[in-house]
Image: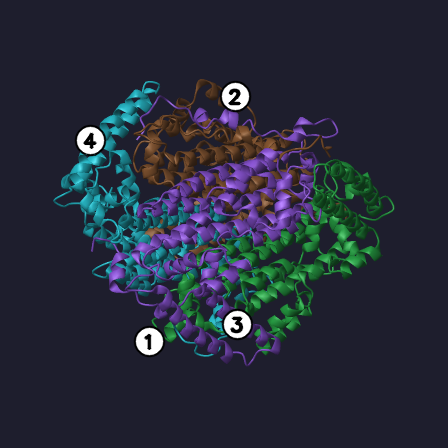
Chain colours: A purple, B green, C brown, D cyan
């Protein structure tokens, strides 16, 4: 605990003199008799600054999570800390998603009053947001061609270099993969989770097929085709878990990023999350999905907002705006593989039984 | 004011005996020693019932709005009522969007416990939601082929007939169009808004072009092409306002649904919304956009949730689930034309001045 | 519309170098081998800065509203602008109320790590929040003795002087009162709203009494007393509208702040809000109540949070914390008189009919 | 996993024919030419039904939590389930708190149209809400005199009997207390947490006193008194942990409900929550506080809403409405003792060190 070092005043502690001196509307700077200050530019600045402020907090927590994972051994008590910090990031996302509703109190007409002054500035130039994306695991190499071209074109050389450097370091996705690959329990003399799971799946898939077929009578020819096609896809996807070759094919086609080993171990955690030792790991993976989903929703809502503000106009940064953002929302998923794990879940009643010796290891020492 | 008709008891007034007797999990009905009741099925039922309950309220308000518009003359005081009711629908949407977060406390593993019992039931069979869509203006004829096929295939003959009948009545989109077409003020002896606006636009477009061109130097060849293409598109879009032929082309290509007259009058309201008489009409159109946007976001988040719950599995109703829902989110827009009006906004300083005689008509009698 | 003045870069426009350099945890400054930086102090700083950032926006909008009211004549189109700006303040309140949930991710144990360093800083020293309160109409003279003593004690002389100066200027409550007192329509040769309303009330009160009495049979003696007491209070409250003397008594007892004339005219707006000319004034008063209610809820939730963080410990600023805050939540109401107007509402069917000549004045010129 | 038992239709599964037939406005039933249906009564019914629907879900989860605690031994994997279910209750609370905003779209004038028909029905008659309160641990014996009298007076004999019976069973507060009292680790040969903690506290309290005294110079006489008083109170409160007699005094004065043993063990969990075995118990206690806080906020906001709707009028149930509700918000706290534990937290650096042997027991078997 730190000792008091002398009296502190609220205004000084928060550096408010400096902090509250950063809102300088250009429409005020260039105001003249014909062009008065645009009242809503202050809102525009403050909304974006609020994003940046919270991005800083997200980075503060994200960095601490990466530091924990960078250690050779992640202690069990560390997983608790990771959960706490990711939970905070998730809550910050929920909070700032509400900022769009405040921003929309500025109507398109009000935006027009100062919009031209901002060209070619653009939200794509937010370095902190790029940093968050990269540290989560969304490097520019994950972005599509147009995308990469687009981003690098908008940034100053200095900023571009900074992001390139960042991409050289480990990100949360990679750390998660390594951590998952180290998960014990799944293969040992007493228990081979992979084999037992594969056997259970075979049985279930057969039953699933029966279920669909028995309901197929009332469907049109077109729907019938669709469902049969779906069944085949499901089967193929399962197969991709059971051989390196099939797995690699899915990876090559862009359908999976996680290694086969990490995928299966993540599945193990999802299936047996009720075991005390797997509860926090399960919470951790759930939070990673939440965070991914929240950014996706945020990008999508942002796209709708851009459309509303600009119609089909060109964005201040020269992008075609909303169409671009919508595509980005769908493509820029970091933890999609965790979502897709649901494909492979099987009911508790069908789960391979964990031998007592291993079950004990998953529990606390004190009993 | 109604007179009291005798003492009322909370439980009876809300018909709670009947209301709270409607939650009957199938996993309880079919429970046996091997297959106990699935704890989370109650949540699944209640979440969906909560949606239906609020859909009923939305329909209650939406129907009253349609009734107001169906009158030969919409009084100014009626517009206030419409605004109040649409505002309520918007707030209900905000409320129920939060239900997804509650539903997600059921994990995919928990869903698996009772999922098979529900086949082939599906949320697509919600008649009230279809009714809301149709009454807003999203008939099956607005849906794409696959879409139409898909929906009708899932419904009982009785329900299908009911929806078909509903599509025969006027919807909010049509009423809005008719109401917009009746807007006075835009063309008279003293003032031809359409001509004056066209002249103002010409000037601005030229300037816009200059702005983009002056910033084009630092761009790559690819970006340059994109921007020049964008400029041309903007110009063509404006042209579509100024001739019936160009307008019809856009309509035929699926780019606009509103008539040319309604489009221009809606634009008039947006541009001159500060005039007292146009304030409530502007609020009304804003709420229609809000409602459209909220349903769109809701469908999108619903798609993400389905993906998380099922991965790439087949939905209980046999749909490929999340991919379908995402496409639906993008396509099923009712008031997209109002969003796109932002394309045609021009700054207040460039607005054609309204002659005093008309300005007075837009104001209150009392001065 | 402003002309572009040269290319703008996102980072420069938002002054991010300066803005993101204002988060300096004291636990980092004074860190040593035994006392490392407290990870959560950054969150503590950022949450409070986010409040201050949004307070600045609220003041920006609130000041513009005060400027409008300070004019000799408030145009009808101005009321639309006031509604828009108050609506924004309301939405900002909703947004920042969510910050408490983020702050609560810092547990009391984590707070302890750096709490002692902050003494005696306190949120009560937020000058912007005080400014908002004063400009809404909550001067220190409205605060109770302890309260006033408490505040002035915590502030630097400079800040104290600044607030004292602010209290000399007109606030929103005063402006509202003056504006209400100027409302036309309520008394003229054709129509005396006050007399007609008083007559209507008399009839209704008699009926209300009958209703209560007819249901009183099944009640216990204690409840019976309570209800009869309530009836009397209601009657007395109504009487306070109908004579200057009774009104003054209520004012003297601290039960009302608004003048009698303003009270009755506000009531007129509430009762006849469906008339086109009164729709926006009604929206405006509703927003004032919303804003008041939101600050009240916020103070209350803040009190619960303080209790959770500190238990019954002494706050860093030396206050007894949550008990103080809860009392403040209840006492510091600016627009309580508007809430209390509901006491005086009567059903539409009992409303005095407005003569046609006046009804026409409440409508638009164009018909 | 349950097997499919034949095709299911959405409408039948949710029993919508019955469910959507429960909204019967009295103003519609008694409508005549002079008194038409009140449009907003449907909203009033649906909002209250939505509460009841979610109360049913809360009870479903709360009952399952009580069932877990009623077992002789709560397994560690059970604590995970409890956390999941309490988390759901918390999210449902967040969801339904938003219903107030929807309800407030009904203005006081609109409520007046049908209010008299409802007399003397009242939300206080919600049996499910009472059941939740009782099962959390808020029995009528915890309510104050007036309160108890008030409630029982409003209910039918049948309902009153049902609640009385419920109060005979164990509630969450009691179960928590018993569970806390069984916590191992805190007293053994190697480690006496109570003694070591007491020693640490003594040191800290002395320092705290110094801190306050050193800042007391600039304070007024009144503030000085207040702070010195505060210090004494803090010291006394700490003393109440260290002797049965002092503890009992606090209990008798209504300042604590938890037993001394449970209090100290709860404190142990809070202080050492980073130990793997204490992470979930800590999450569980946090959720109990969240749930308590949410009901408290909800009651408070409900009070503000009642004030807005009725002013100082008598509620339909004959209560004086908002004043009552506000008092209820403050008094009806179930887990206040957990909040107050913050009073007794001490910094990590001052925590008694847990001996290795015990630390190992708090960890997983697998290392």
Which residue is the extreme one toward the left? D189
- Please state which of residues B247 and C34 is positioned toward the viewer in this rendering: C34
Which numbered mark, 3 or 1, is in the foreground of this view?
Answer: 3
Q: Position of residue A53 (x, y in %)?
A: 50, 36
Report the residue that reaches farthest toward the right.
B189
The kind of secondary structure element at disc 1 is loop
Q: Dot 4 falls on which chain?
A: D
Residue on which disc 2 sits: C165
Of all chains, the one bearing label 1 is: B
The span from disc 3 to disc 2 (Cα, nearest Å) is 77 Å
Name the chain letter of the residue that bears numbered label 2. Answer: C
Q: Could you tell me how far apart the alpha carbons at marks 4 and 3 are, in whole angstroms?
A: 70 Å
Residue at x-position 35% and y-position 18%: D218
Q: Mark 3 touching mark 2, by CB under 8 A? A: no
- The answer to whether residue D153 shows anywhere in this view is no
- CB under 8 Å between callouts 4 and 3? no
Residue underneath mark 3: A232
**CB atoms of marks 2 and 4 within 8 Å:** no
Mark in the foreground, 2 or 4: 4
Which type of secondary structure does the marked residue at label 2 adopt? helix
The reply to whether the C-beta atoms of the residues labelled 2 and 1 are less than 8 Å apart is no
Other residues around mark 3 within 10 Å, as few (<14) / some (14–19) / many (≥20)? few
Q: In the image, is D253 to the left or to the right of A2? A: left
Q: Single out the residue that lies furthest toward the front.
A: A245
Same-subunit check for callouts 2 and 4: no
Which residue has dot 4 on it?
D202
Residue position marked by numbered label 1 in the rendering: B32
Q: Is residue C17 left or right of residue C253?
A: right
Secondary structure found at label 3? helix
């Amino acid at each position: 605990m730190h000792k008091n070092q002398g009296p502190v005043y609220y205004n000084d502690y928060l550096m408010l003199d400096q902090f509250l001196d950063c809102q300088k509307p250009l429409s005020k700077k260039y105001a003249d008799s014909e062009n008065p200050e645009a009242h809503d530019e202050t809102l525009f600045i403050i909304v974006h600054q609020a994003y940046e402020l919270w991005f800083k907090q997200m980075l503060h927590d994200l960095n601490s999570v990466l530091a924990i994972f960078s250690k050779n051994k992640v202690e069990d008590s560390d997983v608790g800390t990771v959960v706490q910090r990711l939970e905070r990031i998730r809550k910050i996302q929920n909070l700032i998603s509400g900022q769009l509703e405040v921003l929309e109190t500025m109507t398109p007409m009000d935006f027009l009053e100062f919009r031209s002054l901002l060209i070619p500035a653009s939200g794509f130039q937010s370095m902190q947001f790029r940093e968050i994306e990269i540290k989560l695991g969304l490097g520019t190499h994950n972005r599509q061609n147009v995308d990469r071209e687009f981003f690098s074109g908008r940034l100053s050389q200095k900023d571009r270099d900074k992001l390139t450097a960042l991409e050289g370091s480990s990100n949360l996705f990679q750390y998660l993969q390594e951590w998952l690959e180290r998960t014990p329990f799944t293969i040992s003399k007493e228990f081979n989770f992979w084999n037992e799971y594969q056997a259970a799946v075979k049985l279930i898939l057969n039953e699933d097929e029966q279920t669909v077929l028995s309901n197929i009578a009332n469907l049109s020819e077109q729907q019938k085709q669709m469902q049969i096609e779906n069944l085949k896809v499901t089967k193929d996807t399962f197969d991709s878990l059971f051989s390196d070759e099939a797995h690699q094919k899915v990876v090559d086609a862009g359908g999976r990023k996680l290694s086969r080993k990490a995928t299966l171990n993540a599945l193990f955690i999802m299936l047996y999350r009720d075991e005390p030792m797997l509860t926090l790991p399960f919470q951790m993976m759930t939070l990673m999905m939440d965070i991914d989903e929240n950014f996706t929703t945020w990008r999508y809502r942002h796209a709708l907002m851009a459309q509303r503000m600009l119609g089909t106009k060109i964005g201040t940064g020269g992008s075609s705006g909303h169409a671009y953002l919508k595509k980005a929302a769908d493509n820029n998923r970091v933890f999609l593989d965790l979502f897709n794990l649901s494909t492979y879940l099987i009911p508790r009643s069908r789960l391979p039984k964990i031998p007592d010796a291993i079950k004990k290891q998953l529990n606390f020492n004190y009993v």
